[in-house]
Amino acid sequence: MSTHPTIAPFSLEGSHVRLQPLRPEHAELLWEIAKDHLGDLFRWIPYKLESEGDFRTFNSQVLSEQARVLSIPFATFERDTNAVVGTTRFMNMDLTNRKVEIGSTWVAPQWQRTAINTEAKYLMLRHAFETWNCLRAELKTDALNQRSRQAILRLGAKEEGTKPQNCLPRTLV
């Protein structure tokens, strides 16, 4: 029988960002900062996030995943103002084999391309490698999501498994 690292909800904090365990009351706060940017923020997300009700449903589903030890979701806060700015999570966790995915991340437009997401990813990667002793951490995005792909590359990640020239939508005849 293998021993698993502690995977109860926890917080991570840096100079610019605080990642707090996602809670039901975060759904309304996240809706408020996202509602005017739905098309841009969630274009590449494979689930419906178009209303406050969708945010509540999604929040419940993610919290259910956490209860089943499938993911650890966070609300992302700007530390200086204590403003919620988005969300991210550890997912597809396979700590027995020492690997984890970091994803389902979004940050409201006014905080994009700031230190917020970079530091959040640093804190998560540090936790994965130093606390859980992971050998692999994956950052995934849709092959067509150029903005996120560039953000991941700016972190120093290596792109794997994509052939962008073959990822264009095609019409089947």
Image (cartoon, grey):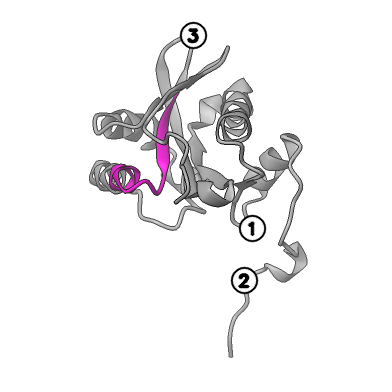
Q: Is residue 12 part of the magenta span, yes or no?
A: no
Q: Magenta segment range?
A: 62-76
Marks 1 and 2 close (CB-CB < 8 Å): yes
Q: Sequence order check: which comes first, mark 3 or mark 2?
A: 3
Q: Is residue 75 part of the magenta span, yes or no?
A: yes
Q: Counting other residues with Cα less than 10 Å from the Cα at mark 1, is it few (<14), some (14-19), or many (20 or more)? A: some
Q: Is residue 161 shown above or below 23?
A: below
Residue at position x 58%, y 85% from top?
A: 172
Secondary structure under the numbered disc 2 in the rendered image: loop
Secondary structure under the numbered disc 1 in the rendered image: loop
In the displayed structure, does residue 27 sit left or right of residue 169? left
Q: Amino acid at mark 3?
A: Asp
Residue at position x 29%, y 35% from top?
A: 27
Marks 1 and 3 close (CB-CB < 8 Å): no
Q: Counting other residues with Cα less than 10 Å from the Cα at mark 3, is it few (<14), some (14-19), or many (20 or more)? A: few
User: Which mark lies nearer to you, 1 or 3?
Assistant: 3
Near-viewer residue (113 or 72): 72
Q: Amino acid at mark 1?
A: Leu
Q: Position of residue 113 (x, y in %)?
A: 63, 28
Q: Sequence order check: which comes first, mark 1 or mark 3?
A: 3
Secondary structure under the numbered disc 3 in the rendered image: loop
Quadrant location, the C terminus: bottom right
Q: Which mark is residue 80?
A: 3
Residue at position x 57%, y 51% from top?
A: 97
Q: Which residue is mark 1?
A: 144
- Quarter occupied by residue 59: top left
Q: Which residue is mark 2?
A: 169
Q: Is residue 32 shown above or below 92?
A: above
Q: Position of residue 78 (x, y in %)?
A: 48, 17
